[in-house]
Image (tube, rainbow, N blue to C red):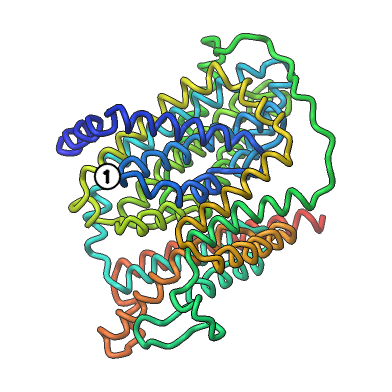
Amino acid sequence: MESLSLLMEGFAGALTPMNLLWVVVGCLLGTAVGVMPGLGSAMAVALLLPMTFALDPTAAFILFAGVYFGGLFGDSTMAILMNTPGQASAIASTFEGHRMAMDGRAPQALATAAIGAFIGGIVASAIVVFFAPTLAELSRYFGPAEYFALAVFAFIATSSVVSDSVPKGLASLVLGLGISTVGIDAVTGTQRFTMGAPQLFEGISLITVTVAILALGEVFYVASRAQRDRRDLKTRSAGRPWLKWAEFKEAAPAWGRGTAIGLPFGVIPVGGSEVPTFMAYDVERRLDRRRRFPMFGKGAIRGLAAPEAAGNSTTGMAMGALLALGLPVSATAAIMLAAFRQYGLQPGPLLFDRNPDLVWALLASFFIAMVVLLIINLPFAQLWSKLLLIPQPYLYAGITLFCGLGVFATSGRVFDLLLLLGIGVLGFGMRRYGYPLAPLMIGMVLGPLAETSIRDALLSSDGDYAALIDSPITWFIYGLLALVLAFTVRAAVRKRSRQDI
């Protein structure tokens, strides 16, 4: 009951005219960015980060949350209409969703995706409301050894799962960790990787890295590709933008199963929504094979409903893990963690105690964002595809301009613009050769936490490394990590076996 009363207070804060405006703006921006392939919520939050310092923290994080959820809705819109997923989390929706669209059922497919995302997000938000405070209370038992174990879990799980090549994932992680160590060591006062440049003594700004890797790197990557023929934006539609009762009954079990599959992955750092969406799709495909008249491959509504619900339930739980544990499970969550730190806030139990107004207004805004996104996407989803008509030179030139203005506004140094350019080229190279970006972002954000935690643990135990594994919580975390790695190895072996057949 206490959570409900606090949530009601949060609604009172979130429904103020200005905060409600930021919810709507965030949802619109997120959806608009999501429908454009290659752009995503991580890039949008990275670009907005230096531009929102004039806002109070509550308004800024309500805006970021709207962008985060809206990006998933927009990704699915283009996956269905154009067979062009905006991000990897929408790939599973293309398999049956685009077939529905090409069969004249585009409005029904869009309605299925919007309702599934709404259900997944609402259920996850409700669970976060009731269990995030409990998680925050549990995190009080976390000491340096436990936080180090969490960081190691995030490092290895993310690096091994989000990339087809584990070495590439680990290389991206090491690169992020290396960037995070540049500057003067706060404990010893030693220069690390500064090459004697005074401009690097304070380290490399996380804002510069995120904007360069996620935004400017994408600009370079798009510019490097040959001009492709623009696809036909006209998709046959039956004109009925709602589901019949029979279609709703067909999709409802898949929405439920997808939501259940996605919830645990909001706490497990596996890089975001990609893994649960594919798992949800695979479960529905296996169930469909047992039916008398299999529908997969012909535009099965369940094959679209489950991944959509799974993706948004994962995102909702990821926000809970970020608030209660300070644990980012995706690139976007990592950037939001950086935003908390920019405002002098640290997610975890102290955030619930010291900033309850911010926390509960943000949690309330999740529910509001789900409703706003449903209103935006059900009647206007086809309209969003028109954003692809913006000429790419204008679109990406504007993004480049905002990259430079955002970074320069935070520091006022030309040196940071040079860093932006250099790291942007690095981001282009990573995209070009298939290196995942999420491990780099996780390493950059959690690297300092891991370093501080292991130092504190060793100092408090007189250098005894056994202190890193001497609590039940660390045993549980490392055991869970072993399970994740075992499943990853098993999947890789099965994939290799199929290739050899």
- Note whether residue 51 is visible: yes
- Tell me the quarter of the picture where residue 489 sits: bottom right
Q: Is residue 339 above or below residue 277?
A: below
In the image, residue 15 lies at what x, y percent? Answer: 28, 28
Which residue, as the protein is rendered here, is positioned at the far bottom? 462
Q: Amino acid at mark 1?
A: Val
Question: Which quadrant of the figure contains the C terminus?
Answer: bottom right
| Element carrying mark 1 | helix
Please state the horizontal and vertical placement of residue 130, each as a whole percent of the image: 26, 40
Residue sitting at 46 percent across and 30 percent down? 256
Residue 207 against residue 258 in the figure, above or below = below
Residue 467 falls in which quadrant of the image? bottom left
Q: Is 69 drawn above or below residue 24 in the view shown?
A: below
Q: Residue at x 30, y 34 (%)?
A: 364
Q: Which residue is mark 1?
A: 359
User: Dot 1, crowdedness within 10 Å: few (<14), some or many (≥20)?
Assistant: many
Quadrant holding the N terminus: top left
Residue 182 % position (x, y):
50, 77
Q: Residue drawn 46% across and 54% down?
A: 335
How many marks do you count on the picture?
Answer: 1
Residue at 32%, 39% in the rendered image: 127
> Which quarter of the figure has residue 65?
top left
